[in-house]
């Protein structure tokens, strides 16, 4: 089994919906349980033996760059990539990292928190050539703000449909992906007028049976995209102090 050493973190978005509590800070630097959200993401990925991080910046990139260069005190190799088109969909941010990632890698969102064991289990999965595996939460009734969540429909261990508005679904996209570099080709092919989302690329993979599902079971995770979701996560009895 090839060991996964690299992680791509998408941290470019405007974070408009969290602005009520973030003020002018980029969302990854908002304090959660005493640390920036981005620090939680990096440290928890490190607990899954990730050594190298490629972080795509956009909105207030200067502040995140300053935090990495002056305030990050952990041991990690971090490469920063800027996306001047950060107002576009998240697939554009992923494409900006293309030249920095040549092996299989873990893909994470800078505003999604997760249990380290979930990441450890994800990177143990076997990737076929040209495949992507998505962490899927089957506990639909327990997902906060289900209307805004990205849903998936599966047949066996294959995802056959993905999107926020699909009518039939049996799981939720957790924002954690195990990827081959072929992801970038799919995002390129899905782009229209220089724009694409991750889900656009995933739908292309799904149409050819190359989008796998890894069910996370009872593991918990949080998408901190709104003040309400942020408050909900703070109330959960989950230790984020690691």
Image (cartoon, helix red, strand yellow):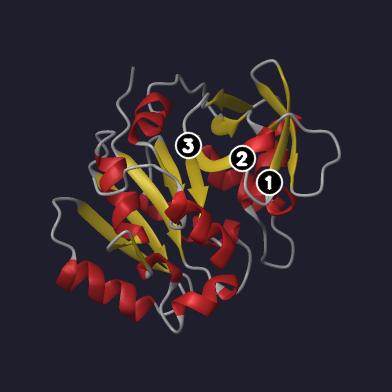
Badge 1 is on which residue? 150
Q: Position of residue 133 (x, y in %)?
A: 54, 30
The residue carrying mark 2 is 173
Going from N to C along the chain, the mark reached first, 2 or 3, is 2
Q: Quadrant of residue 163?
A: top right
- Residue placed farthest to the right in the image? 167
Q: Residue at x 41, y 62 (%)?
A: 56
For marks 2 and 1, the one nearer the N-term is 1
- Near mark 2 (Cα within 10 A), the count class, few <14, some 14-19 or many ≥20, is many
| Residue annotated with mark 3 | 220
The answer for how far apart the CA atoms under marks 2 and 3 are is 12 Å
Quadrant, the N terminus: top left
Q: Do callouts 3 and 1 mark residues in contact (Cβ within 8 Å)?
A: no
Above or below residue 33? Residue 120 is: above
Q: Residue at x 24, y 76 (%)?
A: 66
Of callouts 3 and 1, the N-terminal one? 1
Q: Residues within 10 Å of mark 1 (few under 14, many from 20)?
A: some
**Would you place residue 115 above or below residue 34 in this image?**
above
Q: Quadrant of the C terminus?
A: top left
Q: Residue at x 38, y 21 (%)?
A: 124
């Amino acid at each position: 089994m090839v060991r996964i050493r690299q992680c791509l973190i998408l941290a470019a978005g405007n974070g408009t919906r969290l602005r009520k509590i973030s003020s002018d800070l980029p969302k990854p630097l908002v304090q959660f349980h005493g640390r920036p959200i981005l620090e939680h993401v990096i440290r928890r990925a490190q607990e899954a033996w990730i050594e190298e991080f490629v972080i795509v910046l956009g909105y207030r990139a200067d502040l995140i760059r300053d935090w990495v260069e002056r305030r990050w005190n952990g041991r990690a190799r971090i490469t920063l990539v800027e996306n001047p088109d950060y107002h576009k969909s998240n697939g554009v941010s992923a494409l900006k990292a293309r030249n920095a990632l040549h092996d299989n890698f873990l893909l994470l969102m800078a505003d999604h928190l997760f249990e380290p064991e979930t990441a450890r289990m994800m990177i143990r999965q076997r990737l076929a050539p040209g495949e992507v595996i998505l962490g899927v939460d089957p506990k639909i009734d327990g997902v906060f703000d289900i209307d805004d969540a990205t849903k998936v429909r599966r047949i066996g261990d294959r995802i056959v449909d993905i999107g926020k508005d699909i009518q039939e679904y049996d799981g939720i996209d957790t924002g954690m992906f195990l990827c081959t570099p072929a992801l970038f080709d799919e995002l390129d092919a899905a782009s229209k007028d220089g724009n694409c989302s991750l889900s656009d690329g995933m739908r292309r993979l799904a149409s050819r049976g190359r989008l796998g599902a890894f069910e996370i079971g009872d593991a918990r995770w949080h998408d901190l995209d709104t003040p309400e979701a942020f408050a909900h996560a703070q109330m959960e009895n989950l230790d984020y102090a690691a």
